[in-house]
Image: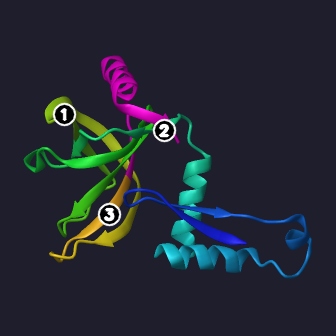
Amino acid sequence: MISAYHSPGIAVFWRIHLTIAELYSNKFNLNLAFQTVAAAEGVGVKDFLKRIIALKHRKYKRFEAQEGLTVAVDPASFPGDQIVNIGLGGLTFNWIDGGKPLPVRFKIDLFRDGKLYLEKLKVKLVTNIEVGDISYSSKNIRRISVQFLSLTPVQEFDVKALIKSHGIEEI
């Protein structure tokens, strides 16, 4: 049985429930299950499987972020876009696509309650998935996941403090 659970906000969490009988019978087709879930989520099977693999292979725990924790890809985009989750290894945020693609490696600024907290953190793009349209504009909302690259000891300390102060619960 395949079912979807919607939570507040944009996030959609999918769970695939399998019974032992379904696994051993010819009734269950794993490829069809992934196609069904991926189609319902609006992504291809390949992107969906990448997400599953990325989630299963994280080195550091991720925490849901409180309101007020934002990221700016471009310093001119202050106060930036809302961070969805954060961990010592990286973060995920919703980004309004202005038509300019993100490079594989770039720098970000983190804001806490509208104030600059960390600047020029080097990151690597992990996933870039379209999650929805803004009805009043031609812009798309994308879910961006990035990995921190070569944090200094001071930056690592500051990220830990940010997680402690603005992390809600482990995901």
Q: Position of residue 11 (x, y in %)?
A: 43, 58
Instruction: Tell me the SS state at disc 2.
Output: strand
Which numbered mark, 1 or 3, is in the foreground of this view? 1
Residue at 56% across / 50% down in the picture?
55
Mark sitting earlier along the chain (1/2): 2
Which mark, residue 113? 1
| Colour mapping used in the image | rainbow
- Can residue 44 be seen here? The reply is no
Viewer-closest of 27 and 35:
27
* SS of the residue under disc 1: loop
Magenta segment, which residues? 145-171
User: Where does residue 20 sit, x and y in percent of width and height?
Assistant: 89, 64
Number of the label disc, if any, that sits on residue 142: 3
Q: Position of residue 115 (x, y in %)?
A: 13, 31
Specify few, some or many for label 1: CA neighbours under 10 Å numbering under 14, 14-19, or 20 or more: few
Measure how far apart labels 3 and 2 are at the Cα level: 19 Å
What kind of residue is marked 1?
Asp
Q: Is residue 17 left or right of residue 128?
A: right
Which secondary structure, mark 3?
strand
Label 2 crowding class (10 Å Cα cut-off): few <14, some 14-19, many 20+?
many
Q: Earlier in the sequence, mark 1 or mark 3?
A: 1
Task: Tell me the quadrant of the picture where the N terminus can be found.
Answer: bottom right
Could you classify mark 3 by the number of other residues whose Cα lies within 10 Å: few (under 14), some (14-19), or many (20 or more)? some
Using the rendered view, name the quadrant where residue 122 is placed.
top left
According to the image, label 2 marks what residue?
62
Residue 160 drawn in magenta:
yes
Question: Is residue 118 rendered to the left or right of residue 147?
Answer: left
Counting from the top left corner in percent of width and height, residue 165 is at 34, 25
Give me the C-alpha separation between circle 1 and circle 2.
20 Å
